[in-house]
Amino acid sequence: MSMIGSETWMFDMIRELGLYLVASPRSRYWQLQQLRELDAEHLADIGVTAGEAELGRRKAAPVPARKSTAAVRHAEAAQAGAM
């Protein structure tokens, strides 16, 4: 890890600790605690499931399958009459 990355990481940890200790609404830990205390109806209002609230992150949507770019270019060229 570079020296700059190390200093940034340390600053972020100190900042988060300070925010947590003063119960700042900007603290990620405080926000997560508040999120976990919401009932299912309020979680549904913001589009989060109870499992996601417990986990502390949203489930990633599956990445749609793509055609290979070479096949797409070949198909486009064939449609244009280049082949």
Image (cartoon, rainbow, N blue to C red):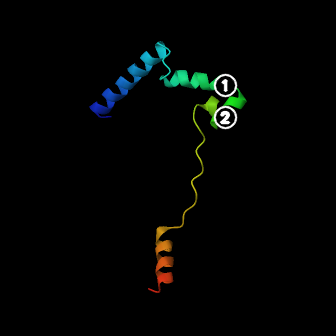
The percent position of residue 59, horizontal first and vertical second, equals 60, 41
**What kind of element bears circle 1?**
loop
Q: Kindly identify the residue that appears in the image at 70 percent across and 26 percent down.
A: 39
Q: Is residue 80 visible?
A: yes
SS at mark 2?
Answer: helix
Say which mark, if any, is on residue 38.
Answer: 1
Q: Is residue 76 above or below residue 69?
A: below
In this view, the residue farthest toward the top is 22
Residue 64: x and y in percent read 58, 57
Measuring from the top left, give residue 60's x and y in whole percent.
58, 44
What's under tag 1, amino acid-wise? Answer: Leu
User: Disc 1 versus disc 2: distance between alpha carbons?
Assistant: 11 Å
Mark 2 Cα shell of 10 Å, populated few (<14), some (14-19), many (≥20): few
Q: Earlier in the sequence, mark 1 or mark 2?
A: 1
Q: Is residue 24 left or right of residue 1?
A: right
Give residue 73's position: percent from left, percent from top.
46, 74
Mark 1, residues whose alpha carbon is within 10 Å: few (<14), some, or many (≥20)?
few
- Which one is in front in this view, the residue at disc 1 or the one at disc 2? 2
- Asked which quadrant contains residue 13, the reply is top left
Closer to the camera, 43 or 57? 43
**What residue would you read off at disc 2?**
45
